């Protein structure tokens, strides 16, 4: 089959996924080296982040959750400032007040990150209301998990966004797990997308480990939301390849399930696709990976060398 | 006596109560995954994983409690209680009274909080006073493994909804915990150290901070009494008043913010009931009126430290009437 996307796009998607993976692996390496703050990594879910975020325009806004690194990095966030935030340093995106769990970067349009599962869904409704009432053609993309879709606020959010005609692209990363509970234990059926119909919202499920499929579906969905000013739900079926958080534990996970999904790793798939298409040589790939690793090493050095905030900052910025 | 961590002590209390009373059950997000030993002993009907949905977890517990079961629900981190507020406050807390006493809500809601894990303000919020402010609820926040067990047993046997807070910094701390019934009645404070010059009232991990401060003060000839409230509602007013009448000086310490907190309640009690016994103003040492920061040094600055407590006690002693001579107390 001829490649559906321009080669430059296919390579950009791979590059963004490699960056996310390298960042997460750096966090894993920190954990292996000694005590380090807990972090929820997105290893295995890079295609959903890279595919959707790459389909957005600069005027669009993103809301994300506790597993946010992929969304931030795909949007162009500085991995040094992200790692600094994880390490509680004053050079972090939130000056050390957030830590890993609630990193917002308003300058990039990544706003209102909440680690209250479902919190981002309600806030996205308000952000989209602003988009609508303040003009422009921007939309709001809201990332959430299959677990968040079990919270009541998921239903409340979709209902209101639908009856008020709000431009929200809901992006459910269905990674099969909700912390220590498999989604099979908590929901009827395998997918979140069918729930949208109850609220008159169009929805689509896409192979979330195929970055090009995600990108194409997201591009169409973004265009539709932008044009119709109506919500849309895109569900990316994917897998959390590691435990809920680092230091990681998968003792409660069926090893066969892990193996099955490792074989569908989104990065391996995109590499294989590009190599097979002749869009990339092994040597290019090696150079690209080495460059990304070097960038992440430099980011980590920057973060580790950054100062902690002054304790005088403790009670600042509480009120506007 | 066996050494157990706080988490193990809670687990032991729950297992013993489930053995004792077949109406006791436990559920929450990941409860069955995290407690395979309870699943294998009591079965998957009495130990359940739930969907990720605090409102329905708490609401199911309240509905079940009023109709014959005795649920324990694990709501994980205290800020997640916000999604369960209606069910806990409006239903479990009020429907007994509003029904003219027709229903009771024998249930326990577990939640973790407190600094030390650098998890930031959506996982760490000492919001226990919110529930003290809500009628019909009891609130427990222990400081030792044995008390975690004893108060959990008492909470499960109580006929009222009990909010049971676990200070995260204590979760893995080991201590001696007896096997079998070690019921600690709700509403009873414990004197952790006797003293005659100043009373340090606290609960949860800052009890240990007060004990450290008392140690320093003792070296300077100031005798501090440390009172561990253990239960925030009902409050053991008698123990507080007895101690303050003896020492005449009071420092209340908690990690939760000062405005309308437990310290304010204790200070008001003492002002109303023991005004004449006070030799100095009441002082509160608390966390700031700010969300809990994640960064380690900021988080440490958030938590009351021994030096601040001993400095406050020293100031009160310097301000007030002379320190009592040994043996003259009371
Ligand atoms: C309201 C609330 N309840 C519980 C948690 C604890 N928690 C954090 S992430 C998580 C699992 C979330 O699952 P899902 O939405 O599928 O996202 P995933 O972690 O799989 O990306 C849980 C239970 C929380 N942060 N907020
Ligand atoms: Mg999930």
Image (cartoon, helix red, strand yellow):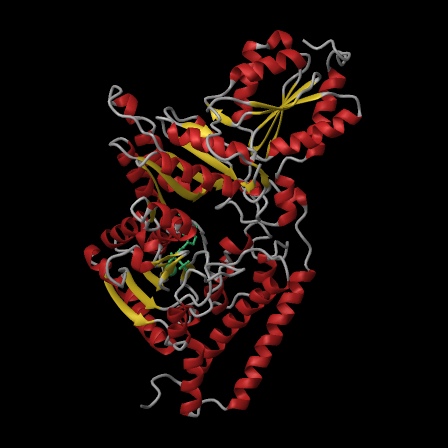
Using the rendered view, name the quadrant where residue A137 is placed.
bottom left
* Image position of A249 (left or right of B94): right
> Can you give x and y, in whole percent of width and height, for residue A268 in the image?
44, 80
Up/down of B269 relative to A120, above or below: above
Pick the front one: B330 or A10: B330
* Image position of A163 (left or right of A51): left
Using the rendered view, name the quadrant where residue A124 is placed.
bottom left
Up/down of B153 relative to B5, above or below: above
Please name the residue shown 30% across and 56% down the image: A185
Pick the front one: A318 or A22: A22
- Residue A224 in sight here: yes
> Can you give x and y, in whole percent of width and height, for residue B165 in the image?
48, 36
User: For the view shown, which residue lies furthest in the top direction?
Assistant: B276
Pick the front one: B258 or B221: B221
Please name the residue shown 39% across and 48% down the image: B31
Using the rendered view, name the quadrant where residue A288 is placed.
bottom right
Please name the residue shown 57% across and 17% down the image: B240
Up/down of B252 relative to A64, above or below: above
- Check the picture and name the quadrant holding the N terminus of chain B: top right
> Can you give x and y, in whole percent of width and height, for residue A115 in the image?
45, 51
Pick the front one: A316 or B133: B133
* Image position of B326 (left or right of A104): right
- Residue A320 in sight here: no
């Amino acid at each position: 089959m001829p490649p559906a996307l321009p080669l430059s796009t296919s390579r950009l998607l791979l590059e963004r996924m490699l960056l996310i993976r390298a960042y997460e692996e750096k966090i894993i390496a920190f954990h292996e080296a000694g005590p380090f703050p807990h972090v929820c990594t997105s290893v295995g879910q890079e295609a959903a982040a890279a595919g959707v975020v790459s389909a957005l325009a600069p005027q669009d806004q993103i809301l994300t959750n506790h597993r946010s690194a992929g969304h931030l990095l795909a949007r162009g966030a500085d991995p040094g400032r992200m790692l600094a935030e994880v390490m509680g340093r004053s050079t972090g995106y939130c000056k050390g007040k957030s830590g890993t769990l609630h990193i917002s970067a308003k300058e990039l349009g990544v706003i209102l990150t909440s680690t209250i599962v479902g919190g981002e869904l309600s806030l996205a409704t308000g952000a989209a209301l602003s988009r609508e009432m303040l003009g422009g053609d921007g939309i709001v993309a809201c990332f959430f998990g299959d677990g968040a879709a079990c919270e009541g606020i998921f239903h409340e959010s979709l209902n209101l966004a639908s009856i008020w005609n709000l431009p929200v692209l809901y992006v459910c990363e269905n990674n099969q797990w909700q912390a220590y509970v498999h989604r099979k234990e908590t929901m009827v059926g395998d997918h979140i997308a069918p729930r949208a119909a109850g609220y008159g919202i169009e929805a689509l499920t896409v192979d979330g480990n195929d970055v090009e499929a995600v990108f194409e579906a997201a591009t169409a969905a973004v265009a539709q939301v932008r044009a119709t000013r109506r919500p849309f739900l895109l569900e990316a079926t994917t897998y959390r390849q590691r435990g809920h958080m680092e230091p990681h534990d998968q003792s409660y996970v069926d090893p066969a399930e892990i193996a099955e999904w490792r074989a569908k790793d989104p990065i391996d798939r995109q590499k294989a696709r590009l190599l097979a298409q002749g869009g990339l040589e092994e040597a290019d790939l090696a150079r690209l990976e080495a460059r990304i690793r070097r960038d992440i090493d430099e980011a980590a050095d920057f973060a580790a060398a950054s100062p902690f905030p002054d304790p005088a900052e403790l009670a600042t910025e509480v009120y506007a | 006596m066996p050494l157990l961590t706080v988490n193990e002590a809670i687990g032991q209390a729950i297992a013993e109560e489930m053995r004792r009373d077949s109406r006791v059950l436990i559920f929450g997000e990941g409860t069955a995954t995290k407690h395979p030993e309870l699943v294998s002993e009591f079965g998957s009907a009495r130990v359940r994983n739930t969907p990720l949905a605090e409102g329905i977890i708490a609401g199911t517990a309240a509905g079940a409690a009023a109709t014959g079961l005795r649920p324990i629900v694990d709501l994980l981190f205290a800020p997640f209680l916000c999604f369960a507020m209606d069910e806990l406050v409006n239903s479990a807390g009020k429907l007994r009274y509003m029904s003219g006493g027709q229903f009771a809500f024998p249930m326990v809601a577990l939640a973790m909080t407190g600094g030390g894990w650098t998890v930031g303000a959506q996982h760490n919020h000492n919001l226990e006073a919110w529930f003290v402010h809500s009628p019909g609820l009891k609130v427990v926040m222990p400081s030792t493994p044995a008390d975690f067990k004893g108060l959990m047993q008492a909470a499960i046997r109580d006929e009222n909804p009990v909010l049971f807070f676990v200070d995260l910094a204590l979760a893995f701390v080991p201590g001696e915990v007896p096997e079998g019934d070690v019921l600690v009645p709700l509403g009873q404070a414990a004197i952790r150290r006797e003293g005659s010059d100043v009373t340090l009232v606290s609960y949860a991990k800052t009890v240990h901070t007060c004990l450290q401060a008392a140690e320093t003060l003792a070296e300077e000839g100031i005798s501090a009494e440390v009172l561990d409230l253990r239960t925030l509602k009902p409050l053991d007013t008698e123990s507080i008043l007895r101690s303050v009448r003896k020492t005449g000086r009071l420092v209340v310490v908690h990690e939760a913010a000062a405005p309308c907190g437990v310290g304010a309640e204790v200070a008001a009690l003492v002002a109303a009931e023991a005004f004449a016994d006070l030799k100095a103003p009441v002082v509160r040492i608390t966390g700031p009126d700010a969300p809990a920061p994640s960064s380690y040094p900021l988080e440490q600055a958030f938590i009351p430290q021994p030096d601040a407590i001993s400095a406050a006690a020293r100031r009160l002693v310097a301000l007030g009437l002379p320190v009592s001579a040994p043996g003259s107390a009371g």
